[in-house]
Every structure is written in C-alpha cells, then in structure tokens.
Amino acid sequence: MALRNILKEGDPTLRKHSREVTKFDERLHMILDDMRDTLDDANGLGLAGPQVGILRKLAIIIDTSGDEDVVVEVVNPEIIEQSGEQEGIEGCLSVPDVWGVVKRPMHVKVKAQDRYGKDFEIEADGLTARAFCHEIAHLNGELFIDVCERLLTSEEIEKMYKQEESDE
C-alpha cells in the first residue's frame, strides 16, 4: 500500500468527469487500498478517484452511522433515490482549510459495484448521505465550493476549532 498525493483546488483534474470502471482487477484493488491508506492518513470522511489523480468512477466513504466506522468502497456509484434535506458544514481534502454551508439530501440510496464488479445498493442518512453526495459530485468534476450557500469566515472557523477542542 502507498499514500497518494491529494490534488488541490486549481488542479484541472478535479474539474474533469470521471470514466466508468470496466476492469475489476488487481490494479483496481491496489488503487482502492492506496486510497484507503491516503484517506486514513488525511483523517477524512471520503475520497474520490479524481482527488488522487485517477479519473475513474470510484470512491471511499466512511460510514459513521453505527457503533463502529465502516469503510464503504463504491465503484461506478450512482444516486438512485434521495429524500429530505439537511444543511451543514462541509470541508474537503482538496480544498484545505476552507469550510462552507451546503444543502444536501438527508437520505440517499446509491447503486454501485464493489471492487470485484458485483452490483450492490446502499442507503445512508445524515452525515454519511452527505459524504456520498460529496464524493459522487467529485466524479462529475464538482467541488463543494460550487454548491455551498456561503463560505465560513476565518473567525467562524477558529470558533469551530475551539468548540471541538472544548468538546474533547
């Protein structure tokens, strides 16, 4: 396994549409494993192929809804149902130190394939639904800053960090 470089806003790769994955082989498995290691190292909730320079429809999302976090790999993901609405603060590993308020569905149902090409569906609510939407948007060349209601000021971000520290 290896850590991959996370591309930053301004890199044209982040604005391109990803292509469908058609080969479910050892190379794909290696890429997914590397992405997981990269996500763990960056302490994020999700990572999409374009963020590590791979223009293929694949992403990793951490499902935090249960007692233990679960890593979900999605290949060729597509949101097939969505409902409700939530508004919350988002950030992105490709847009470091920038946070904004974004509206997303409260619930999503995603159709995808696993690393072996087997079809599956997964449903998610709340933060995990938000993460699925965020990562799938990356596959279409969209960043959260494109859809955010407003960016947070540096004072608001500082207050958010202080609140996190006092909660620990």
Image (tube, rainbow, N blue to C red):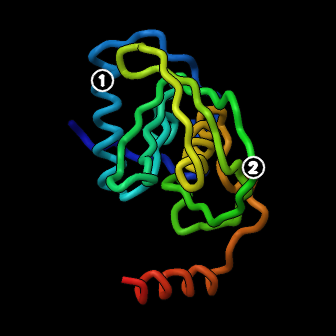
Q: Is residue 123 left or right of residue 167?
A: right
Which corner quadrant of the image does residue 28 belong to? top left
Q: Quadrant of residue 133?
A: top right
**Sooner in the amino-acid sequence: mark 2 or mark 1:** 1
Is 123 located above or below residue 150 in the figure?
Answer: above
Quarter of the rendering occupied by the N terminus:
top left
Give the number of the disc on residue 119: none
The residue positioned 69% from the left and 56% from the top of the image is 145
| 133 or 123, nearer to the observer | 123
- How far apart in space, not on screen, are marks 2 and 1 (Cα)? 34 Å
Residue 72: percent from the left, percent from the top?
Answer: 41, 37
Is 94 on the left or on the right of 27, as rendered? right
Q: Amino acid at mark 2?
A: Gly
Q: Is residue 70 above or below residue 91?
A: above
The local crowd at label 1, few if under 14, some if 14 to 19, many if 20 or more residues have their Cα within 10 Å, is few
Question: Residue 168, percent across and down?
Answer: 36, 83
Residue beneath disc 1: 29
Q: Is residue 20 left or right of residue 113?
A: right
- Which one is nearer the viewer's eye here, 48 or 104? 104
Q: Secondary structure at mark 1?
A: helix
Residue sitting at 35 percent across and 45 percent down?
A: 70
Residue 89, above or below 28: below
Note whether 18 is above or below 157 in the view shown. above
Q: Quadrant of residue 117?
A: top left
Q: Residue furthest right?
A: 149
Residue appearing at x 50%, y 86% in the figure: 163
Q: Nearer the viewer, mark 2 or mark 1?
A: 2
Determine which residue is flagged by label 2: 84
Q: x, y (%) of residue 25?
A: 32, 13
What x and y, as percent, mark residue 79?
A: 65, 31
Q: Please, what is the three-letter code of the amino acid marked with disc 1?
A: His
